[in-house]
Amino acid sequence: MENRQVTQNDIASCLKISHGSAYHIVHDVLQFHKVSARWVRWQLTPELRKRRVDACEELLRRFEQEGDGFLARNITGDKIWVHFHQPETKRASKEWCHSSSPKPKKFRTEPSAGMVMLTLFWDEKGVILEHYTPRGTTVTSASYSDLLKNHLRPTIKSKRRGLL
């Protein structure tokens, strides 16, 4: 418990047991699993944290007053980088070959060459808008405001009449 980054090999050698026994004890008996830390872009300042907490408390207060009708009127959005293609993994490219067969070749692809930013908006009924930001475009407050005004707003009007 003191060193959560200890390896199974270290555990096995320290306890003088086999690697398989160490694995069984850690995974099956104690039910521990290795999990990588998630990288975050920045640490919230106390001021920003307070603003987010205040916003969440306001949303909770409105939900308590209005109930499910409040949730039905909410639209959520998120941005993510996506690839134009799904590169084949090394495991997926494995094939059965005879010892006399030539080894298959796979050319290295550049994953970042086919990336684009997807901005997705949805509500309780499903996806409202998928917007792909053109390559080389920087997402600024002005471009995001333009997305909301010129793309999301008309889409809400056509797909969710009365929601605005």
Image: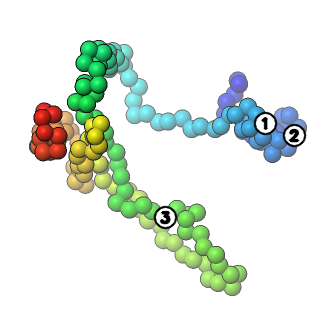
Question: Marks 2 and 3, how far apart in space?
Answer: 39 Å
Amino acid type of the residue tagged 3 in the rendering? Glu
- Report the residue marked by disc 3: 88
Question: Marks 3 and 1, how far apart in space?
Answer: 35 Å
- Report the residue marked by disc 2: 17
Q: Residue at x 76, y 34 (%)?
A: 29
The image shows residue 49, relative to residue 23, as above or below, that is above
Q: Is residue 147 left or right of residue 44?
A: left
Query: What SS does tag 3 mark?
Result: loop
Residue 90 is labelled as: none
Query: What SS does tag 1 mark?
Result: helix
Q: Residue furthest front?
A: 68
The image shows residue 47, relative to residue 10, as above or below, that is above
Task: Locate residue 46, reporting x and y percent.
Answer: 36, 15
Task: Locate residue 36, reporting x and y percent.
Answer: 57, 38
Query: What SS does tag 2 mark?
Result: loop
Q: Residue furthest bottom?
A: 100
Mark 1 or mark 2: whose residue is earlier in sequence: 2
The image shows residue 41, relative to residue 129, as above or below, that is above
For the residues bearing labels 1 and 2, Cβ distance under 8 angstroms: yes
Q: Nearer the viewer, residue 29 or 53?
A: 29
Amino acid type of the residue tagged 1 in the rendering? Ile
Residue 25 is labelled as: 1
Task: Locate residue 42, reporting x and y percent.
Answer: 39, 29
